[in-house]
Amino acid sequence: MYIEASGVDRSVEFRKRIIDLKRGQLVVSQRALAKRWKWHRTKAVRFLRKLEGRKIIFIETLSLSPPCSIITFLNYNELNPINKKNEK
């Protein structure tokens, strides 16, 4: 999940809608994550809530049908600093 986070601010198409993502964010459905991890959806939701409780991620639920979430990794910039080329 972390590796899928956007490395730069960008717009993505998700379910025929344009969603603006900032660096360190990804858009995904909880059902898709559960399927990828081969878990029941409620287990995936509990895991995500645990990460959110530990201040690792922030979950913003979007009102699409079916619902999906923008997941923000709160420490993304610290773990993946932007490399400035030609900086002395």
Image: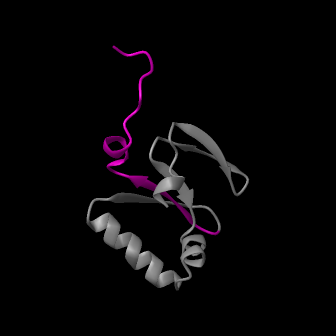
Look at 73% across and 53% down and name the residue there.
16
Residue nearest the observer in this picture, 71 or 8? 8
- Nearer to me, 3 or 46: 3
Q: How is the image coloured?
A: one colour
Q: Is residue 52 above or below residue 4?
A: below
Query: Is 35 one of the magenta-colored residues?
Result: no
Specify whether 52 is left or right of 13. Answer: left
Q: Residue at x 50, y 51 (%)?
A: 5
Residue 9 vs residue 59, the one in the foreground = 9
Q: Position of residue 39 (x, y in %)?
A: 52, 83
52 to 86, vertically: above or below = below
Dividing the image into 4 quarters, which one contains the C terminus?
A: top left
**Which residues make up the magenta segment?**
66-88
Let me know if residue 83 is in the magenta part: yes
Residue 37 located left or right of residue 84: right
> Which residue is the extreme one toward the bottom?
40
Which of 16 and 44 lies nearest the eye of the viewer?
Answer: 44
Residue, far left: 54
Q: Could you say which quadrant of the image residue 50 lies in?
A: bottom left
